[in-house]
Image (cartoon, rainbow, N blue to C red):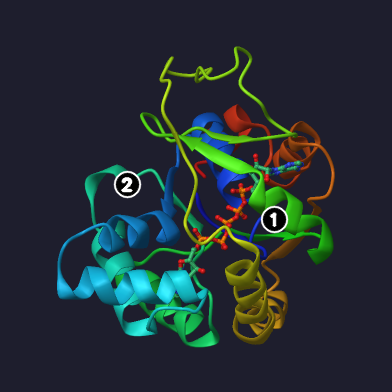
């Protein structure tokens, strides 16, 4: 199964991607995570990427395409993969088509997480992540069961992203509106676009996505 999760910053792409990965056994490929790892490196490229992320702009299509092409060629993508944060421009959508064509692969669905932009600032500025296993939390919507302790791995260190401040978030929304939203009609024309109301509770959104993809076992039996 090859999927794309599309939606503006804070729509819940990372949250739902982790649930899909768990339930359907497809690997989550987050270009944001890959870039944050690069940005943490003490190199010229690391520094360049860090500046772009902190400005809330997009890195070059060329860099992203090389990262994805390398990543989808690895062994763990054999059962499929879920693209979280890619493609983000029409050029990237075309580059993805070329990559899949070369490998004889086809895209199964593009799931759009539909949201009201105003609600998202609260989601983004309230989120934090377990430093050990990467599980995502939120100050209001998803707190750990035991305060200060990760539900999944028991870790006690948490991190917040440096691009989750209001000014950068506004720039990220602008980048989404201007560069990413125009790719929706591209996938609609191909008959691949599915829309889910992502302003509902996390579990309800997950149920709706299951409705789109089919129950995990049935999807596996169908060879997806
Ligand atoms: P990226 O990491 O992809 O960030 P983003 O698209 O801005 O999306 P977020 O990660 O902020 O939000 P999300 O939709 O994953 O929401 P989440 O699940 O965390 O990209 C970062 C940067 O990298 C970009 O700005 C760009 O510079 C660069 N980049 C990345 N890909 C690129 C590309 N292809 N080309 C060029 N540049 C690229 O949820 C948010 C919070 O809300 C969480 O706390 C969560 O617990 C909570 N929440 C989730 N769902 C719900 C719900 N239903 N109800 C209540 N709370 C919820």
Q: Which quadrant contains ligand 1?
A: bottom right
Q: Is residue 127 above or below residue 180?
A: above
Q: Residue at x 66, y 26 (%)?
A: 143
9 up-or-down from 102: above or below: above
Question: Which percent across, then down, holds residue 205?
Answer: 77, 41
| Residue named by callout 2 | 78
Tell me the tag on residue 209.
none
Q: Quadrant of residue 79?
A: top left
Total marks placed? 2
Q: CA distance from mark 2 to mark 1?
A: 27 Å
Of residues 29 and 163, the one drawn nearer to the viewer in this rendering: 163
When the figure is inspected, residue 98 is found, relative to residue 35, above or below; the finding is below
Q: Is residue 92 left or right of residue 34?
A: right
Q: Is residue 75 left or right of residue 196?
A: left
Taking the image as drawn, is residue 185 in sight?
yes
**In this rendering, does residue 222 appear at all?**
no
> Which element carries disc 1, helix, strand or loop?
loop
- For mark 2, give the secondary structure: loop
Quarter occupied by residue 219? top right
Q: Point out residue 28 in the picture as x, y percentages from the top left corner.
A: 44, 47
Q: Which residue is disc 1 drawn over?
A: 11
Pointer 2 or 1: first along the chain: 1
Front disc: 2 or 1: 1
Is disc 2 in contact with disc 1, using a CB cutoff of under 8 Å?
no
């Amino acid at each position: 199964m090859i999927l794309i999760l599309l939606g503006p910053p804070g729509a819940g792409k990372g949250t739902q991607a982790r649930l899909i990965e768990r339930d359907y056994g497809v690997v989550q490929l987050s270009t944001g995570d890959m870039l944050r790892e690069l940005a943490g490196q003490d190199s010229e490229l690391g520094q360049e990427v860090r500046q772009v992320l902190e400005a809330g702009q997009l890195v070059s299509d060329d860099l992203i395409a090389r990262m994805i092409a390398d990543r989808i060629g690895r062994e763990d993508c054999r059962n499929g993969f879920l693209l979280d944060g890619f493609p983000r421009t029409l050029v990237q959508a075309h580059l993805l088509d070329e990559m899949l064509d070369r490998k004889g692969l086809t895209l199964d669905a593009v799931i759009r997480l539909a949201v009201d932009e105003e609600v998202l600032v609260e989601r983004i500025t309230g989120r934090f992540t377990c430093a050990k296993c990467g599980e995502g939390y939120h100050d209001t919507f998803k707190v750990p069961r035991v305060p200060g302790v990760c539900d999944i791995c028991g870790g006690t260190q948490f991190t917040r992203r440096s691009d989750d401040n209001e000014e950068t978030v506004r720039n990220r929304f602008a980048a989404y509106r201007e560069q990413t939203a125009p790719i929706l009609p591209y996938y609609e024309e191909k008959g691949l676009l599915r829309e889910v109301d992502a302003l509902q509770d996390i579990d309800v959104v997950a149920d709706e996505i299951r409705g789109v993809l089919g129950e995990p076992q049935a999807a596996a039996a169908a060879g997806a």
